[in-house]
Every structure is written in structure tokens, then in C-alpha cells.
Image (cartoon, coloured by chain):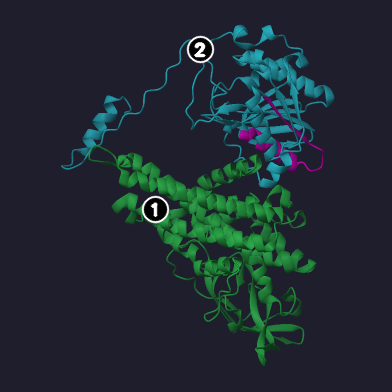
Amino acid sequence: MFELSREHEEFRRTVAEFATAEVAPYAAQWDRDHHFPVDTVRKMGELGLFGLTAPEEYGGAGLTGADGGFTSLCLAIEELGRVDQSMGITLEAAVGLGINPILTFGTDEQKATWLPDLVAGRAVAGFGLTEPGAGSDAGATRTRAVLDGEEWVVDGAKQFITNSGSEITSLVTVTARTGSRSVQRDGATVEKPEISTIIVPAGTPGFTAEKAYDKLGWHASDTHPLSFEGARVPAENLLGERGRGYAQFLATLDDGRVAIAALAVGCIQACLDMSLEYAGQRQTFGGPIGRKQGVAFQLADLETMLRAARLLTYSAAAMKDAGAPVAAFKQAAAIAKLHATESAVSATRIATQVFGGYGFMEEYPVARFYRDAKVLEIGEGTSEVQRMLIARGLGLPVE
Amino acid sequence: MNIVVCVKHVPDATADRKFESDNTVDREGVDGLLSELDEYAVEQALQLREKRSDEEISVTALTVGPAKAADAVRKALQMGADKGVHVSDDAIAGSDYLGTSLVLAKAIEKIGSEQKVDLVVFGMASTDASGGVVPAMVAERLGLPQVTLASVIESQGDQVRIKRDGDTATEVIGATLPIVLSVTDQSGEARYPSFKGIMAAKKKPVESYSLSDLGVEASEVGAEAAYSAVEEATARPPRTAGEIVTDEDGSGATALAEFLASKKFI
């Protein structure tokens, strides 16, 4: 049987206590005000949540795979997500998209410059990949970076970038065309864009985080469109190898899928907890509604979804910590993300139904989870992308 | 400097708590945790260690209790204490404050026989028995000054100054180490253990003592030696629904006032 270690369970309890005391009481207000709570992010940093997968020299926990560092990050995301999906995604994106690319591909100098603040939660960073006309289709990237002497000049636009415009955002890493190269395809020579990643510090003239999006959910998460108009950064801000920008991004994507699955598990757990409590309290026809099979069976479904999603998620996380072969982990990550996020959307639908009319009222957190859940099926690879990957994992030549 | 923090493993207040047939608390059949009020004591000890980086400070978490009480020590180690001591002996079960303070004092003496103990820190009370008298008793047994109910703690060299907030005045008290100190829940929020701290705690040393290790006779402690006994324990009746006054004709305020007067609140 798959089990978490005692230390992981104790850590889960710690984060659960933190989430209950420091996040839950304010989540509804932050959601209403579209407020990104910088002080709480800092407290999450003090608890070490941003450094669970970072080495000690940058202020991280310095854990090895055997310690289960990635699993601990997933637990933290789940437990924050159980009370507030916005704070769960803030942590997930800060680590997966902010810290990881620099940790994995950065030079010693880049790491020393940026990581200490990011790991401490004093700063967050965004990853600018998606554009109005390009997401998973990297070839369509239009943002350009041209080397002018000792500087890159970045022009273009990015969209849906998490943690990119908060008052503590220290940088965004952006993918940009830095040239093109000729490749042979079907006997013909075609020009393929060369994509590289470049670190653009917040406050760089010409770089603007535009007004935050008005989103369906994740209101307390910081998400902006970005524009670059002749934004100049030093040549040494190239992150990793020139021309490997998209490949580098793909390499960090699988972890993010498992982390989003963990966020979905937190959502399902919240749905079950809220529904169970309500089904015991709410009286109709002389008894609690939990006595009715129509309600009770739905709660049974929630519990079943929760267990399945949790097992898929944490076995994928354990594979990552154990250093499983890439192909096997990729498949496990895609399956966990697909199943957990689609279950989360179903779970919020069930929970709002259990709450009846109250489920439609913003006065109850159920409505917030209902709005927050949908994006789980979209961010870090849509359900369709996961299905494509899983089918390819089966050996099917899916386009 | 050598600091000992006394911590207690108590039943989780949110769990279904029970008593044994002899009216002592059932400590095995219910989930337990480090008493919340003792977390403040651990926090203050750790803060002292951090503030006084000029000298080597060791923080030892000490507990007395059955096997499960080791969890309280482990939590203190996860928060950052350096080592733990767990005194466990079947004969201790049912001890009153006097018995408990004897075991604690002897354990502190034993810890001090290896390296002099400069400071003993307690929470203001436990969250289960809520006596709040053990710090004073331990101070008396050790022959040390007791500086209790501190909300602010400052230290320099061998001097400690604390603030104690009373109902009518705030006192500032100075003392010279070694002392026994107790801290209130106003002394500063306790930190959460990080995952790094949880992993590090696995490698920290925890010593186990029995009564004979401490030179305490079984007859000196436990329910038999206790000066008091719980004769009866009754669960508090469930709360009944409150009374709702609906103000339809302007008589609401009068009704409220009458209610409060009938209960002698006003």
C-alpha cells in the first residue's frame, strides 16, 4: 500500500494548522477584493514553503529525494488549496515557474542574485511563456529578443502570467525568439524559430505588468498580461542555453502537473469536508439531508474521487522523489493531473448541489471553490493536452 | 548557556476526551499534542538562543509522561530545540502537581549534572489541568528564583528582565540567572515547524530516564502519593440554543436588558 512517511504526515498537519489560522479566515475577503496578500506570502516563506525543493545555500531546506522534498511541496500546496486555491496556486507557481527554472538552468551568479529572496518568500517570480497567439505551440512565439551590444532588447507581449505584477515580483523569465535556424523537414528546408529564455527584472524600463485580469476564479492570485517595448537587460540575463528556451520549459513542466494535481486534491478535500458538515446540519422533512440517499451517495462519490486523486498524485510525487525514469514519471504526472483536476471540477459541482441555494451564494466558500476549480483543467496543460500525452505514452502516434 | 524547557503532552482539546476509571485523564486512548501554552515557552527559549548569538546556547526539551508524551518532545525538537529528555515510568501515572514537580526537578538536576542549567522555562499552565503551579514548585525544589507569567523577556549576560501584566499594573522584574521562568500566551506567537525542522528532528538526541535514573522512589509519586484526588468527573452538558430576541415593535432593547438583569450581568 502507498503511504506517506510520518514526517510527511506531521508536515501536513503543520501546514494545515498554518492554513487554518493564517489563510482560511481571510480567503473570502481576499477573493472579494482581488487582493494578493503579501504579508501572508511572507509568512509562508518563514515556514519554508518556497524552499522545500531548494538547496540550503539559497535558504532552502536542502532535502534529498530520499527526504521527499517534492512530496512535501505537494502536501503544502494541497493543504493551502484546501482552504484557499489562490494561495495554493501562488505557492505552486512561485516554486514551479518562478524558482525552478532559475534553480535548474541558472548560472551560479543568477542563482545567487535571485534565489535567496524567492526562496524566503520575500519575492516571487513569474514565467512568461503564453502569448495571445502562442501557448503549447512554441513555434508561434512572437516576442523577440535581439542582442544589441551587451544587452538583450525584448519586444512583445505575454498573457496569463502568474506572480508577474505583484509588489514583490522581482523578475519574470520570458521565452522569446532570438533568431531562427534552417531545419530539414519532409525534404524541404524550413526556418524554425530559435527560442531562448531571458530574465527580465521587475522595474526594467519598457517592461510593464498591465492591469490584473478579471478572472472567474483565483482572485487572490496575481495574474497579469505583460508588455515589452524595447526592454533592455544585460546579455548575461540569458537563462540557460541560447535556443533551448522551450526545451528547458518543457523539462520543468511535469513537476508542475503533479503540483496542480495536489491543488486539485485540496479542492476535493474541501468539497468533501464542507458537504459532510452541511449534510449533517441541514434539516429537511424532519432529518438531516445526509440521510437521503440522493445526498449520501454523492458524498460517497466525493470520498472515492478524493482517494483516487490523492493516490495518483502522491504516487507520482514519490516517483519524482525516487528519481523514476522520465517517461514513466511523465505518464504518471499527466494521469494524475487529468484525473485529479477533472475530479475537482466534478467535486465542486456536487458540493454546490449539496448546498442547494446556499451553494450559489458567495456567503459560503463552496461558491468560491466552484469558480476556482475550472482553471485546474486548463492551467499547466489542458485536459486535452494530458490525454494527448497519455495516449502518446501508450505508443499511439497522436498529433 | 543551558536552557531547559519543560513541555507537556496533553489530550487534543478538539478531540473526544475521556477519563480513566480512577478519574485520571485517559492519555493513551486519545490523540495528544504539545500543550499550546508550552509552545510559547519553546518559542521564547529559541528566541533567546537566536538573539544571543554571541554565546553557545543549548535548548533541551524535557517532558514527563507515558510513551506517547515523546511526541511533545519531538514537536519541540521540530521547532528547533537541540535535544530532548523524556522521563517515563508507570509509577508516575496519577501524580499530582507535587509529584510531577519532584520528577521534573530531579530530571533538571540530572541534566544539570552534565552541564549547569542556567534557565528553566515553562508555559504559564498546561491546557489540560490548567494548574499553573508547577513552575513555582519546581523553582522551590531547585532553590531557584521564580520569575513567572512573563509577557516580554529580555536578557543580557546573566541578567534577565521580564514584564508581567497584571490586572491593575504591569511589573518589570529583574533577576540573575539561574532562574525558573514561565511565559504567557502574550509573549509572542510560536513558530510552526518547517519540513526541514521536522526532518532534522529525526537526528536529534532524546534521552529516556526512569524514576530510578533520577533517584526518585516510586512511593514518592503517582496516585498513591498524591495529596489530592479527583473524586468525580462529569462531562459538561451540551450547550443549549440561545434565546433570540426579535425587535419588531421597539421593545427589543428592554427585553435584552431584562435578560441580562435576570442573569445578574447588569
Closest to the observer, A113 or B23: B23
Q: Which chain is cyan?
A: B
Closest to the observer, A117 or B209: B209
Q: Which chain is green?
A: A
Measure the C-alpha gap from mark 1 to mark 2: 46 Å
Q: Is residue B176 magenta?
A: no
Q: In the rendered view, does B52 fall on the left or right side of A69?
A: right
List the single residue furthest toward the bottom.
A188
**Callout 1, which amino acid?**
Val
Q: Chain of mark 2?
A: B
Q: Residues within 10 Å of mark 2 (few under 14, many from 20)?
A: few
Dot 2 corresponds to which residue? B230
Q: Is residue B181 visible?
A: yes
**Residue B247's x, y, as percent?**
20, 41
**Disc sitting over residue A366 in the figure:** 1
Where is the N terminus of chain B found, in terms of image quarters? top right
Closest to the observer, A299 or A389: A389
